[in-house]
Image (spheres, rainbow, N blue to C red):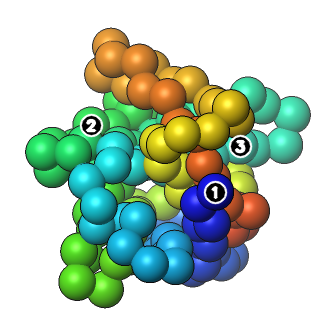
Amino acid sequence: QVHLEESGGASVHPGGSLTLSCVSPGTYISSGYTLGWFRQAPGKEREGIAVIERDGSTHYLDSVKGRFTISKDNVKNILYLQMNNLKVDDSAVYYCAGEGPSRSRVEFVIDLKVYEFNFWGQGTQVIVSS
């Protein structure tokens, strides 16, 4: 079982920036698994927004391309989501997620590719409002 914990959510004005972080005990984040972020707004479906694959390639939901950047620090074992030029529609609970041996799963299509994640955290809330 992998434990993931997100932090960094806050309330910001439109156009603002936030950096979300995701940590996990041990070396899971630096171990080469595909990792990602998804979000869920009240009354809406979960939405995959960014993925970083084992080879370091990154993929994004069209609506966040050019504004969000997923990255990880393999020394600190932290996954990040840098979010710039935030919009009201970005308001949601944000979850970091990773693949691995578990019966739990969520599945997203990002850049026409299906990604399956088996572990995710409790989420961190982002509110964008004026």
Name the kind of residue labelled 3 in the image: Gln
Report whether 85 appears left or right of 91: left
Tell me the residue that label 1 is attached to.
Answer: 1
Name the kind of residue labelled 1 in the image: Gln
Q: First in sequence, mark 2 or 3: give its number.
A: 3
User: Closer to the observer: label 2 or label 1?
Assistant: 1
Q: Is mark 2 on a helix, strand or loop?
A: strand
Query: Residue at 54% of width from left, 56% of height from top?
Result: 96
Tell me the residue that label 2 is attached to.
Answer: 59
Separation of marks 3 and 1 at Cα, in angstroms = 23 Å
- Classify 10 Å Cα crowding around label 1: few (below 14), some (14-19), many (20 and above): few
Query: Residue at 71% of width from left, 43% of height from top?
Result: 40
- The label shown at residue 40 is 3
Q: Where is residue 125 in the image (x, y as percent from the top left)?
A: 71, 66
State the image quarter where residue 17 is shown.
Answer: bottom left
Separation of marks 2 and 1 at Cα, in angstroms = 26 Å
Q: What element carries label 3?
A: strand
Disc 2 to disc 3: CB gap under 8 Å: no
Q: Position of residue 110 (x, y in %)?
A: 38, 25
In the picture shown, does residue 103 fall above or below 51? above
Q: First in sequence, mark 2 or 1: give its number.
A: 1
Query: Residue at 31% of width from left, 86% of height from top?
Result: 76
Quadrant of image for the C terminus: bottom right
Report whether 12 appears left or right of 26: right
